[in-house]
Amino acid sequence: MSAGTPDWRTTLWLATTGGRSDRVRTALTAVGAAAAVLALLAAATVAAAGPEDGPYTSAVLNEVGLHVGVVIALVLLCVPVLAFTGQCSRIGAPARDHRLAAFRLSGATPADVVRVAAAETGAAAGLGALLGLGGYLLGRVLLDEPVTTSFVRYTVEVVDGSENLSRERVTGPALRLPVDVLPAPWLVALIVVAVPLLAALVAVTAMRRVRTTPFGVVRLAVQRPVRVLPAVLFVGGTVAMASFGAMLRATGLDESQGGVQTVVFLVLLLATAAGLVLGTAALSAGAGHLLARRAGRPSLLLAGRRLVAAPFQASRAGAALLVVVLVAAGAQAFGALVSLMAADDVLGTTAEALAAVDLALVVAGVVAAVAVVVGAVEGLLSRRRSTAALVAAGVPRGVLGRALLLEVLLPVVPAAALATAAGALATRGVFGTSLESGRVDADGVASIVRQAVPVPWSGLAVVLAAAVLGVALLALLTLPLLRRTTDPAELAAT
């Protein structure tokens, strides 16, 4: 490679050279890119649908005014998907760094390393993008057949120069999804190309140490988790959202436009989420210290020491899951408020929108839980030699398996509980804890009735349990990998 810049065939060969961890990383990166492309294409399709398209079985899709929310939900769904893809890129990172460092020692320039890293991730993400596009086109063909159902049809009537929206429930043929609408070809091409380029850019950024020096002598200072700032962000944001109305009145923002109040709420929500995610490292380190000092079993001691040694791994892997739990808890609290309202077409549309949000959150939660487990797998692969040494020294594999489960679950449980509480308090603080409605009794006397909005304890428990049990179940599925990584042959790995 010192003779000149390698051609694209050599670069692609170098990019695809590696062991099983590199193959796992390539496959998972392709899956993440396919999911991101599919979600973005779905968002572009909904955005392209107009009032003349359809009708659809979903009232949310039939009402054009709600398309913005659907598009935002689909774009936000890419957040856990991208977090999953980023977590996958760390699988086998030490071995990949050593391989690229060997390229540098053999005469490769930093630009050569950049090309190899970009080709490796870009090729995997490009394959995933094509798979996502293929799945999108296949779905359009499979769902093109309309079904006969009852749906709400919206029409706009112009009366005295003003537009009035009328609703009527009709029965007839309708499409399940907007497969009769196709986004602009340039937008489809942009999405398919942008996702691999973004993945390649992230990979190149991660290679900065290898580009700097081919030797493994870059001093990495051990960083202790920050405790004060995450606590201030989380507690301050949660308290402010829980008392949102009182805070607006105290600051005079209650008389401002709704856009200003929305921006304030989003800032508080982001501060709460940031404090929660950043604070997970401190929770991991604290739980690790507690276990390491008082552990009476080897599995507890191993899990505690690993959490102390790598507290940021849990924070990085569980970030998307905690954000999903935060939003899901808020959605449950909002659903309790909706259930108190009188049933009509508007409420039916709102309930359907909430059901769509719940479905999106379930998908996002599954992807985020997989990202947490992928983080555990990455840690397992990166320390396979030390784990194999423990087995060779006589440590039972069952002890290592229990330590792996504890290492995954211990940071998730307290952080998910805090996220659930914060999400519920935020919604109740914004929309209130009571609902006023007008009533007319048999004598024709009108009155105002105040109803307390119940706390959806069962829904919040389901959110918390689903997050914890989902991570636990997926972690159990990774235990067979433990047997392969603890093979004594790993001691001879370079």
Image (cartoon, grey):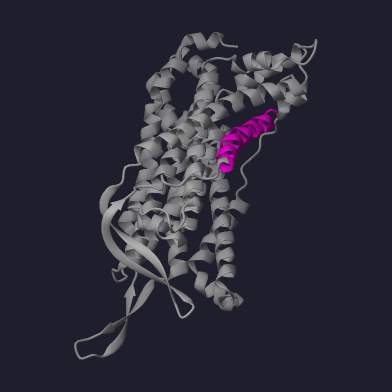
Is residue 404 positioned above or below 430 on the image? Answer: above
- 270 or 160, which is in the foreground? 160
176 sits left or right of 10 in the view: left
- Left or right placement of residue 207 versus residue 44 in this view: right
Report the residue at 44% width, 35% height from top.
Answer: 137
Is residue 201 part of the magenta span, yes or no?
Answer: yes
- Magenta stretch prevailing secondary structure: helix
Percent x, y for residue 78?
51, 43
Q: Position of residue 92 (x, y in %)?
A: 56, 22
Q: Residue placed farthest to the left in the image?
A: 442
Image quadrant in which you'd find residue 481: top left
Q: Identify the magenta region.
A: 186-207
Report if residue 51 lies within the magenta region: no
| Camera sees residue 301 | yes
Residue 330's spot in the image, x, y percent? 43, 58
Q: How many marks?
A: 0
Give the residue furthest to the right: 3
Q: Is residue 255 above or below residue 22?
A: below
Query: 268 and 71: which one is in front?
Result: 71
Q: Which quadrant is home to the C terminus?
A: top right
Q: Is residue 305 visible?
A: no
Q: Is residue 371 above or below residue 415?
A: above
Quadrant in the rendering for residue 399: top left
Residue 49 position in % (x across, y down): 46, 52
Q: Quadrant of residue 106?
A: top right
Q: Quadrant of the N terminus?
A: top right
Q: Is residue 217 left or right of residue 248?
A: right
Position of 176 compared to 322: left or right?
left
Towards the viewer: 323 or 2: 2
The residue sitting at 41% across, 60% down in the picture is: 63
